[in-house]
Image (cartoon, grey):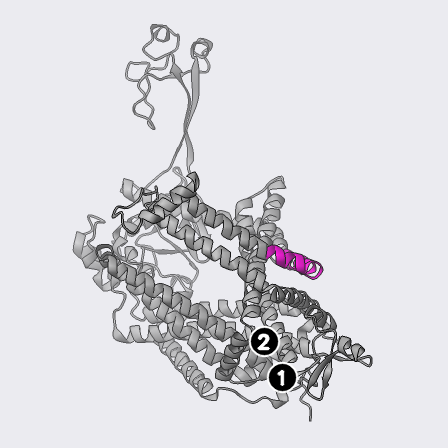
Amino acid sequence: MVCACDLVDNGGDIFKPMSKRCCTDIICLLIFILYTIIMITIAIISLSNGNINWVLYPTDYKDQFCGLADGVVDKPYIFYPQLDRDILTQMPILLVGAWWRFQPYGICVEQCPSRFSLSDPSTYGGPSYPGANLTDPSFYNYAPQEKAFLYCLPTLDPQLGLRREVCGEPACTDPAVQALPGLITTNGTACTTIESDKSVTTAWEVDMDVPAQVAACNFRVQEVNTQNFLPPDATEESRRYEEMFAEYVASGFAVLTALQTNRNVVLIMGILAPFAFTAAWFVLLFLFAGFLVLLALLGMLVVMCMITVYFFYRAGWADGVATAASVLATFPTNGTSSSVSSQGISQTIYAIMGVLAAVSTIMYIIFLFVSRESIIRCISIVREVTKVFWSLPFMAVWPLMGVAWYMFIIFYGILIGGFIVTTDQNTFASIASVVEAQTNGTSVDVSADAFSQFTDLSSSTQQRILLVIHLVGCIWALYITQCSVYTTLSRSAAVWFFSHGPDESGQVVQKGTFYCGLRVVLVCAYCVIARHLGSIAFGAAILTIMTILRLILQAIDHYTKDMQQSNFLLKVCMKCVQCCLWCMDKTVKFITFYGFIFVAIEGSSFCGACMSTFGFIMKYPAQMTVNRLVAQILSFVISLSIPAAAASIAFMWVDSLTESEGPLSVAGTVFLMAFTIASAVTDVFRCCIDTVFVCAFKDMEDNTPPKFMSQSLQTGFGLDDIEKKEDGVELTKAKEEKA
């Protein structure tokens, strides 16, 4: 009985349909299920010990939830009347990064204060506030507030102040100036003070209604000042922090306003345009695959030559080869260092780097010459991959499902992680008691030791254990999502490849239709989850371990910075270990993702797939290297050109409007959105190149002539003249004609 999920009737002995697959790596699957149960348990414990209202609702200085507690149900927004003072007071908490413990003085309000008025000020708080004491202070609003979700945040609103005409030449002490009629004087003198530049002592103010003063001034400027109104106890330092905070908030809201105003431009150029540009790229690859691949390889050669020339130039070898020979000849024995560049790197180091770059360039040229047949095959594979995209365009959209899962996992990780670290949530009352005990309410200068109970980021062993387990689980989940998407895409490309077969004339053609690939991708995703989730979890666990090792090494490097400055050997060892771990991480990722291709094609376990990967590396090292190099270069060019083009068009579009708002903000947002889509599409591109390569070479190994390779791919591989095996001997048409 044929399974309804079998998309390929006959995959030979290479592609295994779903009806012939079984669950792989069951032990790892059970471990994953157990870890998931532990993660759910941690989430339940954190949610039960914490209070979800701390996340959903802001709290005032009485620890009442705005919009929820009795008395403030009709006051859903929080207003911070002394934010500058609170920032200064709780600076020790912010400096250690414990921002979630920052608790400013808050008052629940019905609406955020939208204006400042010196003649009609609004008061907030005081004894009439719900739950307040008779001695609780009331506050005035000194700055307009912008609403961000349920929070009222101050913004800059400078008022127009002094505006006058000031003359710099001639000086105010000039007798001709002293004789002018109607001269404005200050303290009995015509000289005026410039607040922004106290060194100016000879300027005088021009009365524009007196023509003689206007005519007498040779150098006149307009002085325009703005003014802000601050609380009476504000200091210069608190004002500076308040202005910095307000500037950040104003900038943030300016970006949001620009995106809201130009949302159509953002949606069109950030989402639709990248897919259109991607289609254009694949048309170019289909029509000019050979030219683009060769251009990419030659471009790589040009870059390597430029780097080599740069190193030699920095080494001071521009005077001639003789100078280079003398530098290298005297390097081991002269006992003195050569001249040092402005960056602190000696010319000898640049010379060594130049030699290494030159050797690498020569080896690259030799590699291109030796691998010319592999390059021709890679061109055919790239052209074949474009056909995969035209037949299964839904594959280009599928990585966005992975992006959605990434966002969900990150949101879940932050949410539950926040509950874990805030199970002992502090309140404004607890911080206010510390401040009162330290300063008696007379100063904002509180020592860091006084806040030790709030700045201690590891308050309990239980919290540390739960947080580590939670973070590791989130990293594992991110890798499982990435590996599942990759394996699904690989199996979809394999389905397309093995849907080919010989027709009545013996030509290998594609059989059946895919209807944009929606059913193919969904069925492949179901197959990966239902049959190979254990293998996915196995590979993702290995990637998670490598990530944790690199994080631990980064932490060690961070906390030993001072020791490395005083111990050069320790610094060198640390850099070497980081380099080795980076190389190991790249190697593990290469083998892991290639292994998922064999899982997708053959339905094997993860270990068996990795063994197959090693076998392919030993058999076809040149072809795998060329494929990976070409895929990386083309992916780099595509993933940068698409967002750059989309952002440029968006900038010109918004900038050309009559009332344009924030063209740079719109262009930056479009670039990020387009880059995300372009990176996802190039991931599909690299996956399809590797999958088609594996399928084609497996088909060549098992069938002569290939049974599933399309006619165009056989022509590109130079296999269009191979006949079937006869008595174990491969005959070509040419040999048959000779016979």
Camera-nearest residue between 187 and 299:
299
Mark before the other along the chain sequence, 2 or 1: 1
Q: Residue at x 45, y 16 (%)?
A: 208
Residue 203 position, x and y percent, is 35, 17
Residue 86 position, x and y percent, is 29, 52
In the displayed structure, does residue 552 sit left or right of residue 30? left
> Which residue, given by chain and number where applicable, does mark 2 sit on?
488
Q: Residue 240 falls in which quadrant of the image? A: top left
Q: Are marks 2 and 1 in contact (CB under 8 Å)?
A: no
**Above/below status of 101 relative to 613:** above
Point out the residue furthest to the right here: 505
**Above/below status of 353 relative to 707:** above
Camera-nearest residue between 340 and 59:
340
Residue 447 position, x and y percent, is 19, 54
Point out the residue furthest to the bottom here: 1
Q: Main secondary structure of the magenta part?
A: helix
Q: Residue at x 37, y 66 (%)?
A: 580
What number is the disc on residue 14? 1
Q: Please report the bounds of the magenta region as a residue range.
A: 273-296
Q: CA distance from mark 2 to mark 1?
A: 17 Å
Q: Secondary structure at mark 1?
A: loop
Q: Amino acid at mark 1?
A: Ile
What number is the disc on residue 618? none
Q: Residue 687 falls in which quadrant of the image? A: bottom right
Camera-nearest residue between 601 and 544:
601
The quadrant in which the N terminus is found is: bottom right
Q: Secondary structure at mark 2?
A: helix
Q: Amino acid at mark 2?
A: Thr
In the displayed structure, does residue 125 sit left or right of residue 209? left
Pointer 1 local density, CA inside 10 Å: few below 14, some 14–19, many at least 20? some
